[in-house]
Image: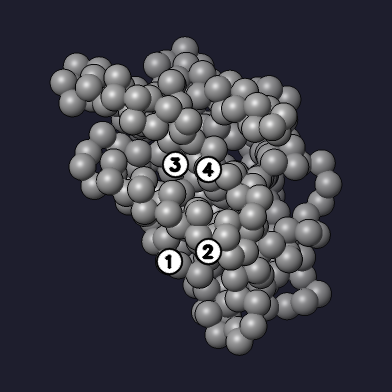
């Protein structure tokens, strides 16, 4: 099972959109995927059609030793794609973890040990707050972090803080944690700054920047309304083609990292 967190301290970088659409692409590649929505806004949960709601939530798993993450898994309309819901349901979990005297940063890692077998990928949709106890739990639990950025000053500057946080968690709690890479979202090919970043980012971060970027596309906004990943909404649109290429590049990078 490969665990990946999509995270950036800046909001509006396309984390949720990327989680849902990468998940869809992985399904097309015959992988079984679980999304864990760790954002109190719950957008990943809201952007997918849930066909079977689990009797329990992540909060139940945190607060009740008899409940496991398996009890919180919901089925979506996409076969092979499941989700553990986020949003307001996370509020009590956040409070419960905050109040713990010991082991507050390792709660999620302990819970993940009892995830059902059979998932090829677990993708985490995270809130923009790097210092949130929920995000720290994610970083302690996962293997890889994937960082989406927008072509704007705050987003571009935010990746440095993100990389520093990853390094700190590596040193203190999760030595196996790796930055999988950085990719650009909502790219406008006609904008001069965007074109400059397409050329500059691989030179700035040769070991981290993905060659693939996600073009701004209206279907990226329409697919969540239809409660589908892009590839199940309009497989021929620019956004879907870009996420397909990004997923292939991501899989190649993971394979390369595992060989080292």
How many dots with numbers?
A: 4
Q: Which mark is residue 136?
A: 2
Mark 3 or 4, closer to the camera: 4
What is the spatial separation of the Cα atoms under label 3 and label 2, in whole angstroms?
Answer: 15 Å
In the displayed structure, does residue 74 sit left or right of residue 243?
right
What is the spatial separation of the Cα atoms under label 4 and label 1, in whole angstroms?
Answer: 17 Å
Within 10 Å of the Cα at label 2, are there few (<14), some (14-19), or many (20+) other Cα atoms?
A: many
Q: Which mark is residue 179?
A: 4
**Nearer to me, 179 or 150:** 179
Q: Is residue 135 visible?
A: yes
Q: Earlier in the sequence, mark 3 or mark 1?
A: 1
What is the spatial separation of the Cα atoms under label 2 and label 1, in whole angstroms?
Answer: 7 Å
Residue at label 1?
131
Relative to residue 146, is residue 90 depicted above or below?
below
Residue at label 3?
147
Question: Disc 2, disc 1: CB below 8 Å?
Answer: yes
The quarter of the image holding the N terminus is: top right
In the displayed structure, does residue 48 sit left or right of residue 150?
right
Place residue 82 in its image quadrant: top right
């Amino acid at each position: 099972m490969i665990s990946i967190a999509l995270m950036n301290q800046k909001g509006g970088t396309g984390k949720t959109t990327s989680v849902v659409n990468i998940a869809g692409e992985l399904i097309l590649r015959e992988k079984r995927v679980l999304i864990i929505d760790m954002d109190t806004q719950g957008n990943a949960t809201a952007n997918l059609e849930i066909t079977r709601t689990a009797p329990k939530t992540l909060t139940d798993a945190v607060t009740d030793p008899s409940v496991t993450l398996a009890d919180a898994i919901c089925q979506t309309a996409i076969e092979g794609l499941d989700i553990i819901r986020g949003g307001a349901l996370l509020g009590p979990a956040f409070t419960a973890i905050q109040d713990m005297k010991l082991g507050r940063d390792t709660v999620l890692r302990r819970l993940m040990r009892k995830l059902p077998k059979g998932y090829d990928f677990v993708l985490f949709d995270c809130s923009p707050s790097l210092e949130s106890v929920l995000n720290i739990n994610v970083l302690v639990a996962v293997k890889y972090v994937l960082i989406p950025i927008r072509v704007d000053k705050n987003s571009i500057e935010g990746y440095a803080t993100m990389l520093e946080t990853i390094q700190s968690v590596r040193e203190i709690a999760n030595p196996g944690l790796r930055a999988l890479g950085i990719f650009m979202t909502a790219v406008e090919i006609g904008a001069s700054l965007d074109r400059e970043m397409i050329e500059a980012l691989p030179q700035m971060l040769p070991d981290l920047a993905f060659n693939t970027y996600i073009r701004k596309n209206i279907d990226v906004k329409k697919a969540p309304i239809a409660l589908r990943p892009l590839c199940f909404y309009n497989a021929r649109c620019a956004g879907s083609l870009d996420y397909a290429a990004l997923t292939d590049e991501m899989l190649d990078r993971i394979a390369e990292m595992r060989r080292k």
